């Protein structure tokens, strides 16, 4: 069987490749077996593969899940960022590689019945306090597993709607590529008829959930070197 392998962030750097075809015996193999085969082919990523998350055809995959001929298997570290069809519930999911307009995004999720919009916007921080010292960041470099990231953004929106029925519009935007200090990195915006319609809670939930399940990573570039910033959340079967 032949499967397509995708590597992201630290794994991509260690292997020196982002994608390659892998041949395994038989007509199917567990994700665990695929992981072992990748480690054998690229020993430099073996240690990182031990803690990497797996996705099969753009869905999180447990070790015992079976991969078949022609499937795509992705490996990536724990996550560290279309439009809806309903006019009453507009949705935007974007992975732009250039600056975006917050005003334009707010306008896109506002309907005549909207009276409140809550926006969370993240920016590139130039200094981070660590162990009592300020560490300087020159820039951030963002990478995404784009098809899966967009699918998981839609999942986050579905989860928001299941909890806050008063939310009207939802926007989830995550920049990718090289971002300089002060530039916007991520945006979660939720609209509702009133400020107590769930938009505050939904926006907070949206950014927290994005950090858990949307496969986007960032590399922190500092004067003394660079490193991928990896999270600690591992997806559950419900994710």
Image (tube, rainbow, N blue to C red):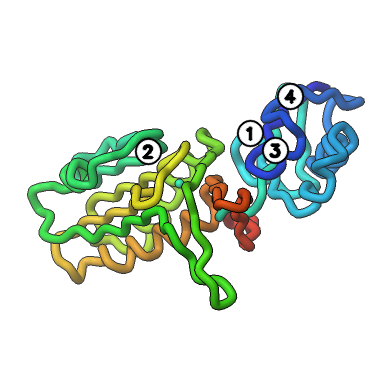
Image depth: mark 3 or mark 4 in front: 3
Image depth: mark 1 or mark 2 in front: 2
Dividing the picture into quadrants, the one containing residue 31 is top right
For the C terminus, the quadrant is bottom right
Q: Secondary structure at mark 2?
A: strand
Structural crowding at the residue carrying mark 2, measured as other residues with C-alpha within 10 Å and reported as few (<14), some (14–19) or many (≥20): many
Q: Is residue 90 above or below residue 195?
A: above
**Nearer the observer, 175 or 135:** 135
Residue 7, image x, y percentages:
68, 36
Real-space CA distance between mark 3 and mark 4, rounded to the nearest whole angstrom: 14 Å
Real-space CA distance between mark 3 and mark 2, rounded to the nearest whole angstrom: 25 Å
Whether residue 86 sits left or right of residue 115 in the image: it is right
**Image point 49% across, 55% down: which residue?**
137
Image depth: mark 3 or mark 2 in front: 3
For label 1, the residue is 57
For label 2, the residue is 94
Tell whether label 4 touches label 3 (CB within 8 Å): no
Real-space CA distance between mark 4 and mark 1, rounded to the nearest whole angstrom: 15 Å
Q: Which mark is residue 148?
A: none
Structural crowding at the residue carrying mark 3, measured as other residues with C-alpha within 10 Å and reported as few (<14), some (14–19) or many (≥20): some
Q: Which mark is residue 13?
A: 3
For label 4, the residue is 20
């Amino acid at each position: 069987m032949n499967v397509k392998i995708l590597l992201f962030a630290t794994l991509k750097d260690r292997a020196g490749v982002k994608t390659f075809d892998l041949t395994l015996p038989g007509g199917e193999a567990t994700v665990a077996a695929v992981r072992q085969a990748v480690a054998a082919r690229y020993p430099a990523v073996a240690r990182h593969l031990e803690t990497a998350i797996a996705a099969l055809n753009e869905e999180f995959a447990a070790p015992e899940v079976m991969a078949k001929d022609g499937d795509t298997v992705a490996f990536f570290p724990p996550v560290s960022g279309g439009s809806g069809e309903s006019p009453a519930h507009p949705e935007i999911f974007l992975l732009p590689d250039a600056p975006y307009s917050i005003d334009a995004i707010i306008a896109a999720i506002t309907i005549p019945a909207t009276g409140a919009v809550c926006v969370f916007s993240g920016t590139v921080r130039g200094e981070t306090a660590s162990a009592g010292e300020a560490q300087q960041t020159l820039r951030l470099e963002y990478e995404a597993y784009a098809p899966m990231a967009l699918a998981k953004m839609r999942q986050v929106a579905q989860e928001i709607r299941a909890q806050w029925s008063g939310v009207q519009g939802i926007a989830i935007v995550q920049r990718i590529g090289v971002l300089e200090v002060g530039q916007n990195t991520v945006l979660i915006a939720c609209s509702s008829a009133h400020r107590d319609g769930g938009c505050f809670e939904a926006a907070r939930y949206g950014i927290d959930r994005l950090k858990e399940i949307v496969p986007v990573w960032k590399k922190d570039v500092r004067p003394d070197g660079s490193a991928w910033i990896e999270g600690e959340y591992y997806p559950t079967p419900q994710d």
